[in-house]
Image (tube, helix red, strand yellow):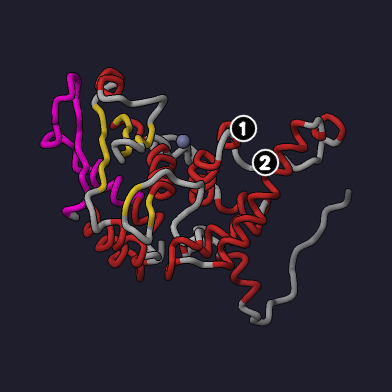
Amino acid sequence: MPDAGRAEWFAQVRAVAFHPSLDLRLIGERRQDLTEQLPSSARWLVAGHIIEVLGQRPDILQRFLLRPRHIRLYTSGAAFAQDGGVAGGDYDAARERVQLGLGRLFEGFGGRLPGVAPFLHEFGHMLDAFDASAGTMGAGSGLLPGLSPRDGDLFDAEARRLFASGKALEARRYADYRAGAASRDADAPLPIGHPYVFQNDGEFIAGYLELFLRTPHRFAALNPELFAGFARALRQDPRHARENEAAYRRGAPLAPAGITIPDA
Ligand SMILES: [Zn+2]
């Protein structure tokens, strides 16, 4: 991140981390509330993820934080299961909350390569459930805030067009694969997302939000329209470190190449 933006970014994260509507709790076994033992890094990571997604959409963020938003982290698998946690983490629509093991927040930060981001995925489900016009949580329809005409002044028709067109391409790639295209043509493009996210619209938006932020270069290369739909909806392009490309695009004259090609 460029130095210029860093201080402002931290201020945004801090504002969410200590926002009165961020109902973030640590739950132990037998549903014991252990929030006073919540590591401060967990609070910062949750807030950082939220700003990573909505940092350029203060209008959506402000509406999102008008009411308490519930996030439950758990000390163990047993604590997670005893409080109704499902699979490896979930968004519980009835209780309007993200439920995730505390340890899963830190996944993807410790390895040699960026890994999965379970909180981003569950937050994608939560944003899908968020009705931006009413400020309430609902059933979700597989769309980010601003992609539905029901979102009123937040609705962005061009972002929806790009998203729909790009999603249709992923659906075609998935259907082609199922129809056996991969066995006929080894170069047939595969969907970007894991087969898991094709089971319904909710998993699709959660999975592709995670991919948009975690593997943006690959995402943009394989499905430029879908990438542009996310970029427009979230008003950001998460592709960083494009200095080499920028050096050409500036249009400044370049020195003649001084390289040689070895004999084949
Ligand atoms: Zn999911």
Q: Is residue 214 visible?
A: no
Q: Is residue 46 visible?
A: yes
Which residue is drawn at the image coordinates 19% and 43% (left, top)? Answer: 40
Which residue is drawn at the image coordinates 20% and 52% (left, top)? Answer: 21
Please tell me how crowded label 1 is: few (under 14), some (14-19), or many (20+) other residues with Cα within 10 Å.
Answer: few
Which residue is drawn at the image coordinates 49% and 47% (left, top)? Answer: 141
Which residue does the numbered mark 1 point to in the structure image? 195
Q: Would you say residue 39 sits in the magenta stretch? A: yes
Figure quadrant of residue 145: bottom left
Q: How many marks?
A: 2
Q: Position of residue 192 (x, y in %)?
A: 63, 42
Camera-side residue: 260 or 201?
A: 201
Which contiguous range is marked in magenta? 20-49
Depicted 7 relative to depicted 43: above or below: below
Q: Secondary structure at mark 1?
A: helix
Q: Position of residue 61 (x, y in %)?
A: 33, 60
Depicted 228 relative to depicted 199: above or below: below
Gap in angstroms between the C-alphas marked 2 and 1: 8 Å
